[in-house]
Amino acid sequence: MAYGLLKPPKNLVIDFAPSPRQYELWKLLQPDYCPHCGGHIEQVLIGHNSQGNPQYKPQCASCKIQDLPQLILGGGAAGGGKSYLGSAWVVSSCMRFENIRVVVARKTIKSLKESTFNTIKTIMKDWGLKEGVNYKINNLEGFVTFWNDSVILLKEMVDLPSDPNFERFGSSEYTAAFVDEVSEISERAVEVLFSRLRWRTHETFKTPRMFLSTNPTINWVRSRFVQDDDGNPVICKEGEAYVPFSIFDNPDIAFRQTYEASLNKIRDKATKERLLFGVWDYIDTNEMAAYWEFSGEKHLVSGLREKVYNPLIPIVISWDFNVSPFMSTLAMQFDFGNKKIYILEEILGRPENKENNTPVLAKKISKKYLTEKHVGGLFITGDPSGLARSTQTEDGVNNYTIILGNINSPILRAKTKLLSKQPSQTARLEFINELFKGYDGWEILIDMRCRRFAEDLTYQRKNPDGTKSKAKATDPKTGQKYEKYGHLSDCLDYAVCLFVKDSWQKYQRNQSTIETTTAPVYGAFDF
C-alpha cells in the first residue's frame, strides 16, 4: 500500500495510565506546555547580538518562568518503565502532529531494532493502529511513516573514528528525539543530535525536546545530570532536567513483581542496587581489570576523609605528570600501627582550568592544605621519571624541584621521597592486588569521592604479559589522543611500593620468579 493511501484511525481507545513518576516525566515532554503551571510557551525578546540581530528565549506565557526543560534524563533502575514511556511519547507525538520527524536512537541499529523499536511496534498495535492502514514500516531504511506524513526515524549513534563530529547527520532537521540507553553514547553525539532539532519545532513543541533514558552509569551522564565528581547532587543547568526511576515506578504490577523477584536473585550487591533501586554510587566488578581484586563494595567508603583524616600526621601526595586527560595526584595517609592505607582524595589538574601543569597544580595543593590548617607535613612522591630534567628547564630543575618550589611553606614542610626506579609493572600489579586481598595484614580504604581513581581500578585492563594496558582514547573536542586510564592507579603503585616497603620487599622475596627492581629511597623516614 502506498503511503498516500494510509488512513487516519477511527474510534481509538488508548488505555495509558502512567505511574506518578512516569507522569512527572510525561509533563516535561509535552509540547507547548509549562511543567510548572501548565501554561503555553512563547518566545520573548531578550536583546540583540553583536550584529544587531534580535535574540529570543522561550518563556511560559502564564508564570513567566524561562527554565523550561528541553534535554531530559529519565534514569535509574531497570524495568522502571522509562523506555515504555519514551516510546509512548514518540508514537503519541506523531499521532498528534502532522509532518513531524522524531528520531529514536541507540548506539547501534541492531540493538535499537531488538529492543526499543519492538516496544514502539507493540504500543502502536495495543493502541489500535494497523500496519499498512494507519502506518507503514520501512525496515530497509529504518523508518515508520504515519497517515499524516509524520515519521519515526531509527538512528545509530556509535562513535566512528572516520566521523568524530557526526557529520553523517549533515544538515538533517528533526522535531524531537528519544535516545535510549544513552550511557552507551558519547556526550558529543547527544549534543550534535540536539542541535538538529529544528524541523517544525516552533509550530508544534515550541522548544526542542530530547528524552534520554539509562540505567545508572558512571560516565558523563551521571556527572552532568545526577552527581558531581564529589558525589554531591547536580543542580541541572537551565533547560535540563533529571527524573529518577526505580522498578517500583512501573505501573504494571504483574511485571514489577516478576522482574523484582528476578533482580533479587542477583548476588552481587552493587549490581542489584544499581538495577533494582537505581543507585548511582556503585562500582562494577571487572575480572579482566588490571586490579582484579579491587571491590567497590569492600574498598570504597562514603565520607572516609571525614572519618579518618588526621591533621597531625603526614599526607603523602603521589604524582603522575601526564597532562591529558588531566594531571593526577592522590592524597593518602598511612596508619602503620593498624596497617591501613587511607586514600583520602584525588586532586586533579584539569586542562579546562589550566591546572594540568606542575607549578599550577602544586600551588593549588599548597593553598588547599594551608587553608585546611594541615600541620602534619607533606611527603611528595610519585613517578621517579619526574626527576629527569626537561629540555625546557635548566640543570637541577625537574618536576619535583618545581613542586617543592611552589609548596615552599614552613607550615607544610614538604619533602620529597622517591623510588630510585619504577618497579616492574607486573610485580607491582600482583603486589597491589594482594594488598587489596589483605596481604601481610594491610587494608586499603578509598574515599567514595575518588571517582576517577575508582574508574582506573575498575576499567584499566591487563595485557597478556601482566602489564597494564595503556590503550589510547581520542578527545572528541580536540582530536588529541591520550591514555584514558591508569594515571591515578600509577600514583597508588608508586606510593605503596615506597611507603609499605617492608611488605613490598617481603613479597618480592616470596615471588623470586618475578623479575623486579629493588626499591631504595631517597632520605630516611621520619614519621
Image: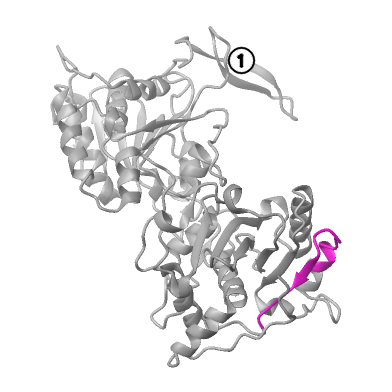
- Residue 416 located within the stretch drawn in magenta: yes
Left or right of 375 on screen, residue 31 = left
The stretch in magenta equals: 404-419
**Residue 492 lies within the magenta run:** no
Q: Position of residue 22 (x, y in %)?
A: 33, 24
Q: Quadrant of the N terminus?
A: top left
Disc 1: which residue? 44
Task: Say what amino acid the circle numbered 1 marks.
Answer: Val
- Say if 92 sits above or below 266 in the image: above
Q: Residue furthest front?
A: 337
Q: Position of residue 73 (x, y in %)?
A: 42, 34
Asked if residue 208 is positioned above or below residue 164 in the image, the reply reads above
Q: Residue at x 46, y 61 (%)?
A: 161
Residue 67 in which image quadrant = top right
Residue 402 rendering spot, x and y as whole percentages: 81, 69
The kind of secondary structure the magenta stretch mainly shows is loop
Q: Is residue 376 above or below residue 509?
A: above
Q: Quadrant of the C terminus?
A: bottom right
Badge 1 element: strand
Q: Return the residue nearer the eye: 472 or 396.
A: 396
Q: Is residue 77 in sight in this rendering? A: no
Neighbours of disc 1 within 10 Å: few (<14), some (14-19), many (20+): some
In percent of the image, x 60 and y 21: which residue is there?
A: 57
Residue drawn at x 54%, y 36% is: 234
Tell me where residue 375 appears, x and y as whole percent: 77, 56
The answer to whether any part of residue 498 appears in the image is yes
Above or below, 122 against 395 in this view is above
Q: Name the foreground residue: 525 vs 268.
A: 525
